[in-house]
Amino acid sequence: MRVVEAIEKAKGSPLFSFEILPPEKGNDIQSIYDTIDPLIEFDPKFIEVTYHREEVEFREHPDGTIERKVLRKRPGTIGISAAIKFKYGVEVIPHIICGGFTLGETENGLIDLHFLGINNLLAIRGDNLPGEKFFRATKGGHQYTANLIRQVMNLNKGIYLDEELKNTAPTNFAVGVAGYPEKHVESPNIQTDIKYLKEKVEAGADYIVTQMFFDNTLYFKFVALCREAGISVPIIPGIKPISTKKQLLTLPRTFSVSIPEELQLEIDKCVDNKQARQLGIEWAVMQSKELISKGAPVMHYYTMGKSDNIREIAKAVF
Ligand code: FAD
């Protein structure tokens, strides 16, 4: 079922969804099931699976030479999505990204997903590789997510890259996109970012999932600005419970998000990560309850590979 159809069908009751990461290469898929199993009783309507492009590492050898190694540490998005769909019967939403792919490679990935009966996607650009100042499209790939969405929408009309193909079967993909309540890091201001977000919706996205935020007023303001700009699709809040003291530093650096002073002061008072994790749960419960009371259609949680805290939140919220 498409995300927007599930929202309509729920008639105002909030839906539960969460995001998982493929395990690092060398691990078994059981770690994914161990993350999902404790959450199944809360009836997730969607499970998103992130996509991780190659990373660059520099390795120093004993003779002093430095080797540049390109590694893909978390492959398996399509395989994991299919495994979840067939094991749990839950709708999966694999992320598809621009970075690292030519149009042809993207088309082949979409064909695999279509054959697997996976019809929901989250279309994302991806980040620059370490060592690159800015994101650079792969030669023959997409620079912006809006272009990736246009490619998916073409496939939905049966338009493949090879124009000579005749009588092609159309696909049936529904596409979501990312939105940033605190603006995307590269954007000069929130208005410009929302202008390009609107372009993604006009290209065919039918819902938005937000970057994590820790102050609900940022989400409410963002939704209001989107509505003013003429974006009418559902905007799903993304919630990440803080789980370690160190995340006060790492989350803002990695995701360009802010931590409210009140939350920071409370985490600072925690004597260990166990206390910080508990506080993170309580904060996320408080955020979730307010968001739901003000009409958020779906509560989407970032697990980052661990679900015990998401389970505590789901117990309190759903
Ligand atoms: P875009 O929408 O393409 O925007 C990127 C930047 O370009 C923005 O600053 C935007 O304002 C600007 N822009 C857009 N269009 C134009 C234009 N036509 N002209 C000029 N500027 C323009 N990363 C992964 O690698 N894998 C994942 O699975 C993943 N999942 C994510 C899920 C969510 C919910 C979120 C919020 C982020 C996720 N990311 C993921 C991170 C994402 O790849 C980065 O945030 C990336 O830098 C931007 O992706 P985007 O799709 O928002 O980009």
Image (tube, rainbow, N blue to C red):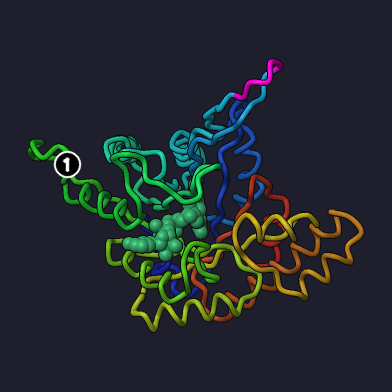
Q: What's drawn in magenta, residue-wise?
A: 62-66
* Crowd class of label 1 (few under 14; some 14 to 19; many from 20; radius 10 Å): few
Question: To which residue does mark 1 refer?
Answer: 169
Towards the viewer: 130 or 151:
130
Towards the viewer: 14 or 251:
251
Left or right of 156 on screen, residue 14 = right
Left or right of 78 on screen, residue 18 = right
Residue at the image point whose x is 72% and y is 59% from the top = 242
The percent position of residue 240, horizontal first and vertical second, equals: 64, 60
Residue 245 falls within the magenta-colored stretch: no
The percent position of residue 311, horizontal first and vertical second, equals: 69, 55
Residue 65 falls within the magenta-colored stretch: yes
Residue at the image point whose x is 56% and y is 54% from the top = 18
Residue 265 lies, with reference to residue 142, above or below; the image says: below
> Disc 1 residue type?
Ala
Quadrant of the rendering where the C terminus is positioned: bottom right
Dot 1 falls on a residue whose secondary structure is: loop
Quadrant of the rendering where the N terminus is positioned: bottom left
Residue 187 lies, with reference to residue 303, above or below; the image says: below
Towards the viewer: 41 or 227:
227
Residue 124 in sight: yes
